[in-house]
Image (tube, rainbow, N blue to C red):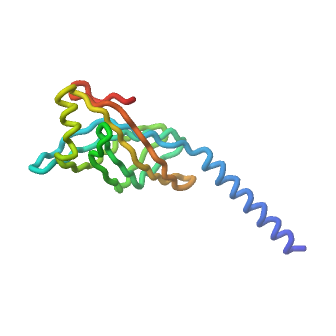
Amino acid sequence: MRARWSAAIAGVVLVATAACASLGRASFKDPVVTFKDARITGLGVAGGSIEIVLDVYNPNRFRLEGTRLTYKVLVDSTEFGDGAYTTKFGVDEGQTNEVRLPLSFTYRGVGAAGRALTQTGTVQYRVIGDFSVATPIGNFTRPYDQTGRFSTLQGNARD
């Protein structure tokens, strides 16, 4: 009889634990990653470096600990550069934090962007990647995809 009660209690605890985990995962809202700015940080003979600035908004009721952020930047439809950011950073509940990402490029990959900027002063961009976070209810990896238009005169406008 005692073994049956122990098994029943263990079963109830297992079901309750699984239900709590499911509810916690259901309450997780994806962070919102948006492109904010791009700044040239260096130029050389074969290429240069840019600092990509993203805003990360946390819509959850708990702090997020960013553990990894992958990114690929496309200008029009041409890949401009990519990378992975592995420095940990936090975003408090309901807050937005800025994340600065280094990006190296070659002039060969810049041709179309340079032509568009000199002709119209604007360029269409797309930033895509994955965002990994640790939360009190588990670890999550979610994709993000942001498009917009960058203007040398007005800065960034998101689509």
Vertical side of 117 occupied by 103: above or below? below
Q: Quadrant of residue 84?
A: bottom left
Residue 45, position as x, y percentages in the image: 9, 50
Residue drawn at x 21%, y 48% as measured from the top left: 105
Residue drawn at x 90%, y 73% as measured from the top left: 1
Quarter holding the C terminus? Answer: top left
Residue drawn at x 73%, y 56% as measured from the top left: 16
Residue 75, position as x, y percentages in the image: 29, 39
Q: Quadrant of residue 35?
A: top left
Comparing 68 with 93, the one in front is: 68
Comparing 41 with 150, the one in front is: 150
Residue drawn at x 38%, y 35% as measured from the top left: 147
Comparing 28 with 81, the one in front is: 81
- Single out the residue that lies furthest toward the left: 45
Vertical side of 57 occupied by 154: above or below? above
How many numbered tags mark residues here? 0
Q: Is residue 101 left or right of residue 18?
A: left
Residue 63, position as x, y percentages in the image: 48, 46
- Single out the residue that lies furthest toward the right: 1
Residue 20, position as x, y percentages in the image: 67, 53
